[in-house]
Image (cartoon, rainbow, N blue to C red):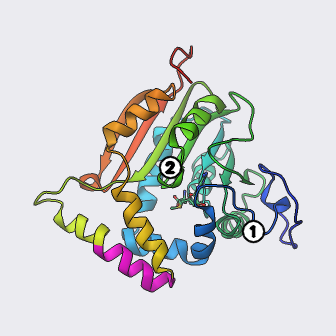
Amino acid sequence: MAHSPLPSDSPVGAPLSQAAAGDVLGGSGAMFDGIAKRYDLLNRVMTFGIDQRWRRRAIALLELPKGAHVLDLATGTADLAIMTAQLHPDAQVTALDPSRGMLAVGETKVTAAGLQDRVKLVVGDAQHLPFADATFDGVTMSYGIRNVPDRLAALREMTRVVRPGGRIVILEATEPPANLLTWGALLHIRVVVPRLGAWLSGAPAEYRYLQKSIAGFPSPAAFADLMRAAGQDVVAVVPLLLGVSHLWVARVPQQLGSPR
Ligand SMILES: C[S@@+](CC[C@H](N)C(=O)[O-])C[C@H]1O[C@@H](n2cnc3c(N)ncnc32)[C@H](O)[C@@H]1O
């Protein structure tokens, strides 16, 4: 992918190399432009590196066939997209995000990993995907759905672009139920993450938003219902580390009976 200056009038769905500077399409992509350069470091510090283990688990739950074409939504700096390509050397990955700043960091990483032929970065919004029906064998989205204003629209788009029988795996941060076992985790999410994030990134509002958006996310069961409302068969809802994150696994039915 080219590292030359980017043209200024690219449409939604354009590869990153053709996207306009400052292209931020809905959601909170603009916010992520501001923290893109420090995002990976902050992730590793604030999750003690466990986040990568959970991305790996998300990929395993996709149960990809040989030669799969995978879509990673809200790809950010492309961690999950790169990991998918590394774990499945015959897979093609399309990695989409509205934040050009995050994608630019991802592009550097994709190039460093020598994966530019198999990981394609695209500027876009999960609520309006620029892909034909049944294009992909599976979709992933890690720590992204929380930021999408119309989550049902994004879930319906996932149902539409995955072939029947293909899987959708969503990884998201959640607040664990308050009890004796989880007080340390709650303290970490509510107090340590916003303060440490503000200090390390120099962007306090962004890390206050992070904590608020986790608190405002639906319960795991309510989010599974939203996936069903989008026409998906929910296969599993997996709590991670006392419930500080969850994985939702769904399959696109062979025959779409549910409302889409
Ligand atoms: C917390 S980051 C997660 C990045 C990456 N998936 C990861 O696991 O590290 C959230 C990402 O969601 C993206 N985002 C925000 N609104 C979006 C939307 N409407 N559609 C797709 N992605 C969106 C942001 O630009 C940001 O890169």
**Ligand 1 placement by image quarter:** bottom right
Residue 166, quarter of picture = top right
Magenta stretch secondary structure, dominant:
helix
Give the camera-side residue of 55 and 155: 155
Q: Amino acid at mark 1?
A: Gly
Residue 114, percent from left and from top: 73, 62
Please say if 34 is above or below 240.
below
Q: Is mark 2 within 8 Å of ligand 1?
A: no
Q: Amino acid at mark 2?
A: Ile
Tag 1 secondary structure: loop
Q: Give the extent of the magenta segment.
A: 191-202
**Alpha carbons under labels 2 and 1: distance apart:** 22 Å
In this picture, residue 1 sits left or right of residue 43: right
**Residue for badge 2:** 145
**Residue for badge 1:** 22
| Magenta run includes residue 196 | yes
Please say if 49 is above or below 164.
below
In this picture, residue 7 sits left or right of residue 43: right
Residue 186, percent from left and from top: 24, 65
Residue 80, percent from left and from top: 56, 55
Residue 150, quarter of picture = top right
Tag 2 secondary structure: helix
Assess disc 1: are there few (<14), some (14-19) or many (≥20) residues with their C-alpha within 10 Å of its C-alpha. Answer: some
